[in-house]
Amino acid sequence: MKVSTRSRPSAVAGAIAGVMRENGSAEVQSIGAGATNQAIKAVAIARAYLSEEGIDIVCIPSFIDVAIDDEERTAIRLLIERR
């Protein structure tokens, strides 16, 4: 899922938690400091949501290249997995 500066962390957290329950892992992508800030907050909130169900998650950050409007950009990729 893609996160922007205007994304609501609680809404993204709910989406992350839902994907984690269904698939066991999730991937979040963001470009820029504001979007990455929202993404990290969402992961922290999702961790709290899932811990109530006994699910512990970890976040593995990395860089990826993505094409936006035929332009190559560097994004942050947050891979979220069960611990």
Image (cartoon, helix red, strand yellow):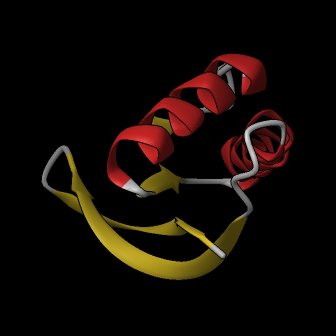
Q: Residue 78 appears in which quarter of the rendering?
A: bottom right
Compared across the picture, whether 31 is left or right of 23 comes to right
Q: Position of residue 6 (x, y in %)?
A: 67, 20
Q: Position of residue 11 (x, y in %)?
A: 65, 17
| Image quadrant where one finds the C terminus | bottom right
Residue 6, compared with residue 73, is above or below; it is above
Q: Position of residue 37 (x, y in %)?
A: 81, 48
Q: Nearer the viewer, residue 36 or 47?
A: 47
Q: Residue at 44% x, 54% y: name it.
A: 26
| Image quadrant where one finds the N terminus | top left
Single out the residue that lies furthest toward the front: 54
Q: Residue 27 appears in which quarter of the rendering?
A: bottom left
Q: Residue 17 appears in which quarter of the rendering?
A: top right
Q: Residue at 49% x, 52% y: name it.
A: 28
Q: Position of residue 75 (x, y in %)?
A: 48, 65
Residue 77, compared with residue 46, is above or below; it is below
Total number of numbered discs in the rendering:
0
Q: Residue at 13% x, 53% y: name it.
A: 70
Compared across the picture, whether 75 is left or right of 48 comes to left
Residue 45, compared with residue 60, is above or below; it is above
